Image: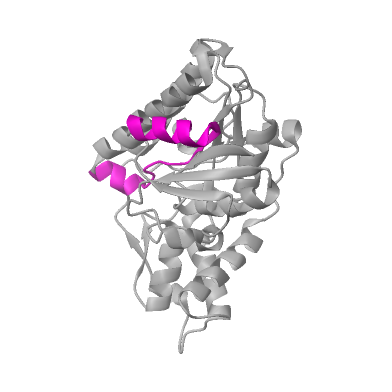
Amino acid sequence: MKAVLVTGCAGFIGSNFVPYFLEEYPETKIINLDLLTYAGNLANLKEVEDTERYTFIEGDICDRVLLEQIFAEHDIRGVIHFAAESHVDNSIKNPGVFVQTNVNGTFTLIDVAYKYWMDKPFVFKSGYDSCRFHHISTDEVYGTLGETGLFTEATPYAPNSPYSASKAGSDMIVRSYFHTYGMNTVITNCSNNYGPKQHNEKLIPTIIRKAIKGEDIPIYGDGSNIRDWLYVLDHCKGIALVYETGSVGEVYNIGGCNERNNNYIADKVCEILDDLQPKVAGSYKDQIRFVEDRAGHDLRYAIDATKIETMLGWKADESFETGIVKTIEWYLQELGLPR
């Protein structure tokens, strides 16, 4: 049975990915390495904690000695690398942490993998030639778009926040290990994810939580910033597909084709809450408040997912309007307010 090291899986996307991957690939076991920072929560993985093919290790991707021990003990044959600092506001306040985890951590991880799998550049150790390093990145590395156009895999990098700059740096490290050492790497850049298990600091969980508590719902600027929204399980399916069948050295953009601005998101969430968990009087929309815009707030992101759709056959199953209902129902359940 092949062991795959999957980093950062107590977080949002990773904790959705692990149960899906274990079910879809019964001949694979997962070693989950997570530092359990504020964004990590082992409760997100309760459904798999007793699964024989799942092992959790608490630790830091910057810890080379620990990584070397994990590779040797579990004979790691693949890496799917989620672990990252990802909250843009936090990167503005404390950028050094983002450089340390996202850049230095990715370097340490891929360098340990290289030395474990390969004898020298372009020469794999016997039996390790199919070992793959899959790096999970973001569309934010491409910068911002105007009113038209889409990010493609050929779009030049132009990161505008310390977070996106650190992710761009990690992408370039992975790219260099493919070109310089001949490692079997793939990179996926995704659009904004939403769905169950997302951290409370993110936009949609914040809207839901504030609405239910009767608090002001903060929306940056005038709410006109646009994102392409991708339901997390659709993203997980895309990651698994690229990891298993993507071409060596390639980059694949994964997007939901669901461009919505923040005003639409807030209104839609409040509309659904009005139906599922109505207030005694009025609408949750009455709680929406515009607040000072975030520094360096990119106007619009939108992904062209043609490459993964045509070459690998991936397609998002959820529209925003179907995925958001599932998301809100999950959060209501978590808040003890079942539909």
Q: Nearer the viewer, residue 277 or 61?
A: 61
In the image, is residue 28 above or below residue 142?
A: below
In the image, is residue 180 above or below residue 239?
A: above
Q: Position of residue 329 (x, y in %)?
A: 57, 72
What's the magenta region?
A: 64-93
Q: Quadrant of residue 85?
A: top left
Q: Position of residue 12 (x, y in %)?
A: 48, 53
- On whether residue 86 falls in the magenta region, the answer is yes
Q: Position of residue 314 (x, y in %)?
A: 72, 41
Q: Please tell me which residue is depicted at 65% across the width and 46% down the height of the picture.
A: 237
Q: Quadrant of the N terminus?
A: top right
In the image, is residue 5 above or below residue 186?
A: below
Q: Quadrant of residue 170?
A: top left
Q: Position of residue 147 (x, y in %)?
A: 53, 40
Q: Nearer the viewer, residue 4 or 261?
A: 4
Q: Please tell me which residue is depicted at 39% across the width and 54% down the height of the picture.
A: 40
Q: Please tell me which residue is depicted at 46% across the width and 31% down the height of the picture.
A: 72
Q: Is residue 257 visible?
A: no
Q: Nearer the viewer, residue 174 or 313?
A: 174
Is 295 on the left-hand or right-hand side of 206? left
Q: Please tell me which residue is depicted at 36% across the width and 51% down the height of the picture.
A: 36
- On whether residue 8 falls in the magenta region, the answer is no
Q: Is residue 162 visible?
A: yes
Is 34 on the left-hand or right-hand side of 315? left
Taking the view exactly as shown, the residue that stands out farthest to the bottom is: 280
